[in-house]
Image (cartoon, rainbow, N blue to C red):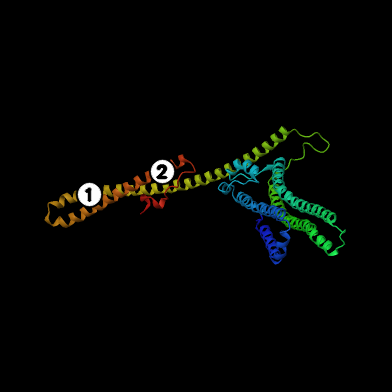
Amino acid sequence: MTRPTIYLARMLVFLMAVAAVAGFLADRLVVFFANNPVLNGLIFLVGLIGIGWNLRQVVRLGPEVRWLTAFQSAPSRAQSLPAPRLLAPMASMLAARAAQSDRRLSLSAATTSSLLDSLASRLDESRELSRYMTGLLIFLGLLGTFWGLLLTVGAVGDVVGGLTVGGGDMQVMFDQLKSGLARPLHGMGTAFSSSMFGLTGALVLGFLDLTAGQAQNRFFNELEEWLAGSTQLSSGLLGQEGEAPVPVYVQALLETTAENMQDLQRVLTRGEHSRHDANQAVLGLTERIATLSDTLRANQQLMLRVAEAQAALGPALGRLAEERAAPEGDRSLRAIEQLLQRLLSESEQGRERASADFRLLTRTVASMSAGPGAPPLAGPGQSPGLSS
């Protein structure tokens, strides 16, 4: 969306140029303004109100553009911004869809047409006052013109009626004529000054209204292009040319069915992704169970070795009993005791590994029961029974 700042800058540059010209002609303008301060002051007041209104028309497009840009990028971000005024119908219509970020915006042709018509009527309504003020300035200029002409005609009639030529003194007659022409000249000044100020103000407001209209048309066209990309047209099978139009409820039912089919397709797609993830989780679990089986087999072999060592320990215990009576058997006794301690330590380690492997098997079965969303299990390398 195009920001309206470029149009606002153009209007400000134009106003600065007008102010520079008015400052250069300030002395003459003050004289012209003094011919009729009341009417000319009213013209200036209407012109200032029109300038402020046209500037407001461009400035108010800024929040609308920011909201629409935020909605296009992420509908959830638009909820944090102030609600728009020109786009109020569209904002209220899309409020429910904004909460579903994964759902693509889809509008029917009738809905898009309704939104654009509402926006166009709001924009035209906002420009009506500007156009009226432009016409009002022209009217005030013409009103001052006719008022000045009426004053001039009345003053000329009074001057002509007040002339006396019976005395024969031409100097006195010219003095009366000079003093009598002051009022007609004042009326002519009122007529021309009000016309000049009125037409000048209408010229300024006309340019500002033209620039504001360009900014609004640019905003409307870009919004129309964006909505056109999100509009679904009918298939054309129903209500073709020359046939009876399709009832509104049938068209609404078809549009709702199409939206439901799209939702169903998205649900099936998500289900396919979930099934793929579940298959991957089952494959990983199968690998872990195979690793656990290898670990249990190794532990079983270790337990067999421990049993064999315990079986071989019987003769050693017999010899230990015989050597206890002999004094020279103390050294052999200590060696046998160390051997027994080592065998007991290996047996204890074997039992601990078997216990750890059974705990790992229990967690693996629990993870299978929890489904693919369960947290990952510790790998075989992290089990205490597989550390050696």
What residue appears at the point 63 percent right and 41 percent down from the top-left corner?
A: 93
Say which of 284 and 100 sits in front: 100
Quadrant position of residue 155: bottom right
Residue 383 x %, y %: 38, 50
Q: Residue beneath label 2, please?
A: 363
Mark closer to the observer (1, 2): 2
Amino acid carrying mark 1 in the image: Pro
SS for dot 2 = helix
Residue 308 visible, this orientation: no
Under circle 1, the secondary element is helix
Q: Position of residue 376 (x, y in %)?
A: 45, 47
Mark toward the start of the polypeptide (1 vs 2):
1
Height in image: 136 above or below 262? Answer: below
Q: Quadrant of residue 245?
A: top right
Left or right of 270 on screen, residue 289: left
Q: Return the residue found at the far bottom.
A: 24
In percent of width and height, residue 271 lies at 57, 41
**Residue 48 or 230: which is nearer the viewer?**
48
Residue position for label 1: 315
| Residue at 65% across, 41% down | 262
Residue type, label 2: Arg
Crowding near the residue tagged with mark 1, few <14, some 14–19, many ≥20 C-alpha atoms within 10 Å: few
Spatial CA distance of label 1 from label 2 is 43 Å
Residue at 19% x, 48% y is 318
Residue 39's place in the image compared with 267, above or below, is below
Residue 194: x and y, percent? 75, 56
